[in-house]
Image (cartoon, rainbow, N blue to C red):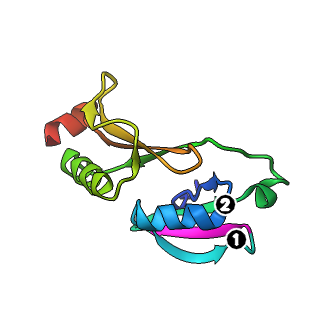
Amino acid sequence: MQAAFPSAVPEIPVKSVSAAVEYYRERLGFTVDWGGEEVGLAGVSRGHCRMFLANAEFRAERGNSAPVLIWLNLPSKEEVNALFREWTVSMSKLMSSPEMKPWGLYEFTVADLDGNLFRVFHDCGTPEMQARE
């Protein structure tokens, strides 16, 4: 029997947990669930998406460092566009506008304060997804 995996929870490398928490809350619309600078780690969430924001001291044992790339798969092009509009209004660090890519994804990219990137996309490229468009 093969075990079903839960949603992955990435650890995002940040310089300052406090500054990152503020950006994720104020600009990207995440909820701060726990933690802070004193432990070097904070949990943030938005909908079913959960992430940990970890400073260099907390990450020292593992050695992971910025930047990292996180892909956020949204259910429709309309939701990609809506999130882009929301993050435009909140003055997030948008790196690109939504556009159809040759590999079949409709996507845009946003950065956090530490240069970590989020590619927000909808998969339009597969025949199954094209049939639903």
Seen as rendered, the residue at the extreme top is 102
- Locate residue 107 relative to residue 51 in the image: left or right: left
| Residue 92 point in image, percent of width and height | 39, 52
Residue 22 part of the magenta segment = no
Above or below, 20 relative to 69: below
Frontmost residue, 131 versus 13? 13
Mark 1 and mark 2 residues within 8 Å of each other at the beta carbon: yes
User: In which quadrant is the C terminus drawn?
Assistant: top left
- Residue 37, which numbered label? 1
User: Considering the numbered disc 2 on the image, is that residue within a helix, a strand or a loop?
Assistant: loop
Residue numbers of the magenta segment: 40-45
Residue corresponding to mark 2: 16
- Locate residue 118 relative to residue 59 in the image: left or right: left
Name the residue at 22% across, 54% down. Answer: 82
Quarter of the rendering containing residue 77: top left
How far apart in space, not on screen, are marks 1 and 2 (Cα)?
Answer: 7 Å
